[in-house]
Amino acid sequence: KLFKEIFMEKFNLPRKFKVYLPLLALFLILVFMMPRSPKFNYDYKKGSPWLHETLVAQFDFPVLKTEAQLMEEREKAGSVFIPYYKLDGKVASRSMNAVSSLELGKWSDAKGVISDVLTSLYSKGITAPYAGSGMEDIKMDPDALIYIQKDRRAVKVPLSEVYTLEDATTFLHESIAKAFPGCDADSLITATSLSSLITPNLVYDQQTTDLIHEESINYISPTQGVMRAGQVIVSEGEIVTAEIEQLLDSYRAEYNTSVGYGESRTFMWTGNILIAFFIVLVLFLAICYCNFRIFDEFNKYLYLLMIFALAAVGSSIVAKTDASLFYLMPFTLISMYLLAFFTKRMVFSVYFISLLPMMIFAPNGVELFMMYLVAGSIAMLVFGIFNRGWLQFVTAFIVFAVMTVVWGAFRLIDGVAGL
């Protein structure tokens, strides 16, 4: 007991046990929020050399397309228009039945030819006059395609293989003239109303066409090919080109989402416990060094730890849902909330430490840490001036401008590295 008192007095540590209970709770929260799987811990920039050992794929992974590739494919898909037709099987049956009742006079032998022609026409398909958005464009395209629904299946068919009403009538005329050279095909067709037997059996479906066109734009595959396990992704010292960066981004995405912890989980828990302990220790020492009397004001002390815990929990939740939301996290509000009760020296120290969990959880933690550290520091500086009424919007604008400048600085680094 004497040694304990001497130790406490020597290092100027609080002696009340209740001071350490909230720290213990904060420590346990951090431990259980720590990542349960390994993180892809390689840093790289396009245009810069790969500074690590040769990286070999440990598993098969899909190669993700870049945003530029996805945008290009969406634009290309949007420019391709393929109309959708439904095949009406009853049309051919009605026309074939009507042939048997035709009165052709001395040219009654032509019924067989007419039946064969109609069978050929309807097997290929006869379309109605072109209608609908985009139809005029594909009509002039010799390589245009259409969808035809046959037996509950949509088949893609070249437009050149189906007939229009005009083409079908011409084909019937030519077939009769060829089979019966002495027959006046025009007079026969007119007298017997043969042209009325040619009815479109392909019905244009505008609704389904629009639906398929929309799906072709929205459902672009996000991947292109697969990288096999054992293949070299990048060699030591090799310049990271756009292609290598794409492979690294794809490998990192698969690594962070799919790879489990391969070693003994005792090591993982030991590492998480140590990291959580050191974060809490740094926070505790910062309070001791900045203002030791806060331990006597227990409500303020709990408030400070609660703000820190909220920042850590928020970082953990965002990391597990969508890491891009880190750019929308209101971390700078931490400094605002603390300034109401604590000195700037205390606020800056606690704010600095509260960003450490985010740097651990976020994939680009260094960039985010720098952005929020600068923004929070500037917010503490200007809040004393612009802290009343509408002037608070001035503070918000300045903070936003600072964050934008820091973010832009990192983008400039990326741009210079890519030259």
Image: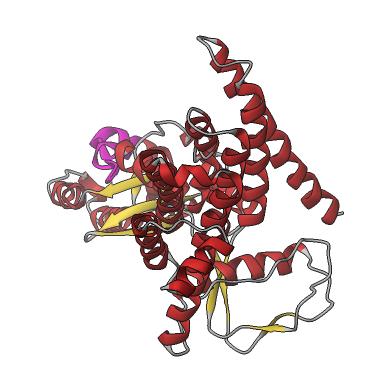
Residue found farthest to the top: 389
Q: Is residue 224 magenta?
A: no
User: What residue appears at the point 57 percent right and 12 percent down from the top-left corner?
Assistant: 391
**Left or right of 238, for residue 137:** left
Q: Say which of 36 and 28 sits in front.
A: 28
User: What residue appears at the point 19 percent right and 53 percent down from the top-left corner?
Assistant: 89
Where residue 304 sits in the image (x, y, percent)? 44, 43
Where residue 311 sits in the image (x, y, percent)? 46, 47
Q: Is residue 194 magenta?
A: yes
Range covered by the magenta-colored residues:
187-204
- In this rendering, does residue 110 appear at all? yes
- In this rendering, does residue 82 appear at all? no
**Left or right of 395, for residue 154:** left
Q: Say which of 87 and 252 sits in front.
A: 252
**Left or right of 156, for residue 224:** right
Residue found farthest to the front: 2
Does 128 appear above or below 107? above
Q: Say which of 117 and 57 sits in front.
A: 57
User: What residue appears at the point 79 percent right and 73 percent down from the top-left corner?
Assistant: 50
